[in-house]
Image (cartoon, rainbow, N blue to C red):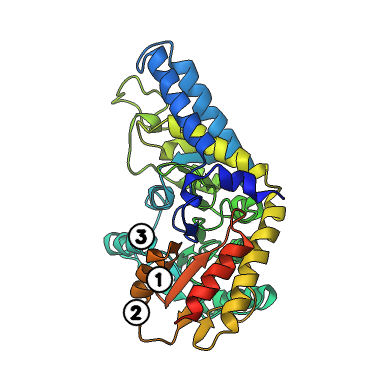
Amino acid sequence: MDTNKLRSQCPALLNKTYFNYGGQGPLPTPSLEAIQASWRRIQELGPFTTDVWPFIGAEVSSTRRRLAQLCGVAPHRLALSENVTSGCVLPLWGLPFDSGDRLLISDCEHPGVVAACVELARREGLTIDTLPVKQLRGDQPSTDAGVMDALEQSLTPRSRLVVLSHLLWNTGQIMPIPAVAERLAQHPQAPYLLVDAAQSFGQIPVQDAAAAADIYAFTGHKWACGPEGLGGVALSERVLNEGQPTVIGWRSLQDESKADLSSSDPFHHDSRRFEVATSCVPLMAGLRCSLELLDQEGSAETRLMRIRQLSGDLWSGLREMPGVKPLMEVPPASGLVSFQLSCDAAPAEVVQQLGQQGLWIRDLADPSCLRACTHVTTTEAETEALTTAIARY
């Protein structure tokens, strides 16, 4: 695999050593050029003319089909969104809940999703329970077994929703989403399964998990190396049938040309009922271009093997150092490598000091640690540079 080609197309990687793919991936120059070309074409046609609508329609349809294909679902199940949070929250708030229902949320979820669930619970009279998965630090079989055991211990007769990321943003563990979905289908309440896919899309194969979840929300600006402001959410047929739109705009409507006060069913019957209004169409060309560039680096499985090789090397190097403790007890299942230092410097200070050397990682609050991410564009020299810098602490 020639990672130098993609690296050379990412200006953000040419003057720094970058390990923050889990926060935001670098945008390749061809993707930026695709965005600019789309914008120019819209202006040439006229941004609001009868000539531009076929172009915009084709951009939206081709993007929806591409993302649906990657998620292993039919296009009518794929809603376009601006980010992971909107992809999670818009359909979540449209689900039917009864006062007294319970939400089961893992202890490794992103604060944005947790806050939305807390507010939903306050408004609807729901109770929040915690699914403990943060302590799972071993290999994949033991992790899978631990998740399923915790699920059995945490579900109640009134559980109505489970929130669990596909790939935990703090420890880097992969969650057995299809197995969780199968177990929930056997529960008397058949709880919905909401999956935050911020760290999985573009990094690991997602089809099985996306097809199994009720809400599988992702973004294009992290591991897919697309532009910020564009993502998607794969929705189950059950959500399409039972969920109601929350934030409503013209894209939610079957007939966007008029407000029909007599209609009892004005909304699309597919995923578009959870889309809102005007969004940035040129970004779609940029994301599709980034996905094509990733495909040139190999299949999702091949890319993951490369990512895991690099993260494993980094994990091994850190593990051998006195005063450094990786969170994982075994080589990482993904490109996320989280670790703790025994030195007096606070994690945020370490991040700042490394940044002054052109090495970019990030700190996390829960658990308090540092996190470095490897991607297919990462090199062995970069992982060695980071371990050398960490050794000085």
Q: Nearer the viewer, residue 261 or 36?
A: 36
Horizontal side, residue 122 vs residue 313: left or right: left
Most extreme residue toward the top, as rendered? 50
Q: Give the mark nearest the N terminus, 2 or 3.
A: 3
Name above or below for residue 384 compared with residue 135.
Answer: above
- Residue matched to label 1: 364
Helix, strand or loop at mark 3? helix
Task: Using a 10 Å C-alpha cutoff, classify the residue at mark 1 as few (fewer than 14 neighbours), some (14 to 19) or many (20 or more).
Answer: some
User: What is the CA distance from the residue labelled 2 to the residue labelled 3?
Assistant: 24 Å
Residue 152 % position (x, y): 57, 76
Q: Determine the image quadrant of residue 254.
A: top left
- Residue matched to label 3: 112
Visible in this render: residue 332? no
Q: Give the mark nearest the N terminus, 1 or 2.
A: 2
Residue 94 % position (x, y): 39, 48
Residue at x 35% of width, y 29% of height: 250
Residue type, numbered disc 1: Leu
Residue 14 % position (x, y): 50, 50
Total marks shown come to: 3
Q: Determine the image quadrant of residue 179.
A: bottom right
